[in-house]
Amino acid sequence: MSKKSDERETPQFLFDNLNKEFNFTLDVCATPENAKCNCFLTKETDALSLSWAGERCFMNPPYSDLYSWVEYASSQVRLDCPLVVAILPCDTSTRWFHHFIWDDILHQTYPGVELRFPKGRFKFGKYQTSPKFATIISIFRSLK
């Protein structure tokens, strides 16, 4: 992974704690080297064009296109995907945050959205330092 890439491996302890609670079946944003689930999707398999129906999804998306990833996760739980747990940058000034997370919580337009604010900043992959932003855990649950 180059420094110019925005694909970052999720810290194993963070994934393990979330997996213990949510029992993931599919990592929707992975490479063969950093996949956290036995079943995973890569850039080549184009997760944003496939159905996530029936899967309990873990998502640490590339930050270069967060709007598309969060929009798709939100749409999939409204269809036939029971769960998407996303590791996202804590940036409440963004369109994706307001369109697919905050507005649903504030206006209760989709009560299946939950936010968690972990303490501190995580180091991703082999990087020696943490990003300049905190992380939020966004949980999208199906209401079906």
Image: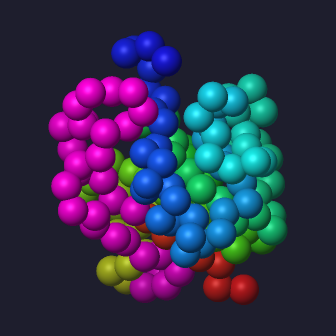
Q: In this view, does 77 lie to the left or right of 122?
A: right
Figure check: 47 above or below 112 = above
Q: Which residue is drawn at 55% across and 75% down?
A: 21
Give residue 138's position: percent from left, percent from top.
43, 64
What's the coloring here? Answer: rainbow
Q: In this view, does 31 lie to the left or right of 41?
A: left
Q: Residue at x 49, y 18 (%)?
A: 1
Quarter-of-image position of residue 140: bottom right
Residue 56 in view here: yes
Figure check: 73 above or below 21 = above
Q: In the rendered structure, which segment of residues is drawn in magenta?
A: 108-137
Which quarter of the figure is the C terminus placed in?
Answer: bottom right
Q: Which residue is drawn at 33% across and 59% down?
A: 136
Looking at this view, is 21 or 138 the one in front?
Answer: 21
Give residue 3's position: percent from left, percent from top.
37, 15
Figure check: 64 above or below 97 = above
Residue 96 in view here: no
Give residue 122's position: percent from left, percent from top.
29, 46
